[in-house]
Amino acid sequence: MRTRQISSYELTRLYLDRLDRHGPELEAVITLTEERALRQAREADREIAHGRYRGPLHGIPWGAKDLLAVDGYPTTWGARPYASQEIEGDATVVRRLDDAGAVLVAKLTLGALAMGDHWFGGRTRNPWNPEQGSSGSSAGSAAATVAGLVGFAIGSETLGSIVSPATRTGATGLRPTFGRVSRAGAMALSWSMDKLGPLCRSVEDCALVLHAIHGADGRDPTARTVPFPWDGEAGLRGLRVGYAPEAFQGDEGTAAFDRGVLEVVRELGVEPVPVELPDAFPLDALQVILTAEAAAAFDDLTRTGQDDELVRQTPGSWPNLFRTARFIPAVEYLQANRVRTMVMGALDAALAGVDVLLTPSFAPGVLLMTNLTGHPAVVLPSGFRDGGTPVSFSFVGGLWKDADALRLAKAYQDATGHHLKHPARFGG
């Protein structure tokens, strides 16, 4: 992640200063964990000086989306009713990054209860254009990483909360296979859909972070230990790649950028094969699963009337979704999950001949479908619009094939270098 030319303590102080200076400009920081960070940095320097090097994350400053519990600090979930909440103990991903020697410098913003980029202190800004929000809900994790305020960050995704802010800010994000990373100590929104993953500047960094945080922990019953055979120098030989032709049609929006990704992949010596994705299911109707589970997770908030304290009260924001979700019949929730199981089988069959699916990040139905099925995705910048803001592309892996998706994404990223461009206003 960096050439070790200065001490971890000096590096941590540098990042804390940048967070203090630029965090308010982006509205991306909820809490600086300065005392904890400086203690960790001093320890990292002592260990490294004595030959105990824990690996590539040792001494690297990072930021946590503020739905992750950190002992001794508030965990606000971005929502005013929880602004003073402290949760005892650390989330598993925090513990594992501690074990890897990484230095936690800040808890970063998220849209209130993991929706959008509006939180109780403002709206997290896009480093490329502060007049824009950074999208969400991993708003602060993406914005702070791209602005160089942290070395990397942890975000979460239930339905686009890594893909969307990575797209807006030009971060490189990884949504791991459902169950690969423990969610113990993280806010629950949808028990059957929530995933934790890294937001970084490069694919290689995402792989390094995933290596540190994946695996079962005995705290999250959905978490499994499955091999993560990452080798950034392995090349693309033997990798089977597919694409859905209909997702690359048209001339509007990002279509030219999307077709450009296909061209680069072909130049890398890989010929993507056409894949026909399932289209016989009412995917939009399956969002009732997320809505019902989220309303159940925050049942007390609704019953006590504290949902009135959330900053957004629009028809499509959480307070009103929680309220209306109480009218979802149990029969319809169960029927939706029956259809979801069918979608899982259909997508598994469609991808049986490929390891990685190339797709525009917001191709119709793909983001929702792959979040429902639990497939991993790597999202990264694929170019920049005339106004200077980034666009993105996604590499969707087969279940537990996170390493394959990362391998192809890294080859594309190395060939194009879009991730090397950073916002000038933040010293990039």
Image: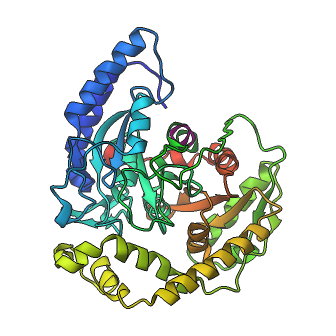
- Is residue 255 or residue 145 the one in the foreground? 145
Q: Residue at x 57, y 86 (%)?
A: 335
Prevalent SS, magenta region: helix
Query: Magenta segment range?
Result: 207-211
- Is residue 7 or residue 159 the one in the foreground? 159
Q: Residue at x 34, y 83 (%)?
A: 321
Q: Residue at x 69, y 62 (%)?
A: 358
Q: Is residue 364 visible?
A: no
Give the colour scheme shown.
rainbow
Q: Quadrant of residue 251?
A: bottom right
Q: Is residue 400 above or below residue 44?
A: below
Q: Is residue 35 above or below residue 174?
A: above
* Quarter in which the C terminus is drawn: top left
Q: Residue at x 83, y 62 (%)?
A: 353
Q: Quadrant of residue 337?
A: bottom right
Q: Is residue 105 above or below residue 347?
A: above
**Residue 356 in the image, given as x and y percentages of width and height:** 72, 57
Q: Is residue 163 left or right of residue 283?
A: left
- Is residue 263 or residue 405 the one in the foreground? 405
**Residue 118 in the image, given as x and y percentages of width and height:** 27, 68
**Residue 125 in the image, given as x and y percentages of width and height:** 30, 60
Q: Is residue 376 visible?
A: yes
Q: Is residue 362 magenta?
A: no
Farthest-out residue, top: 50
**Residue 402 in the image, given as x and y percentages of width and height:** 64, 50
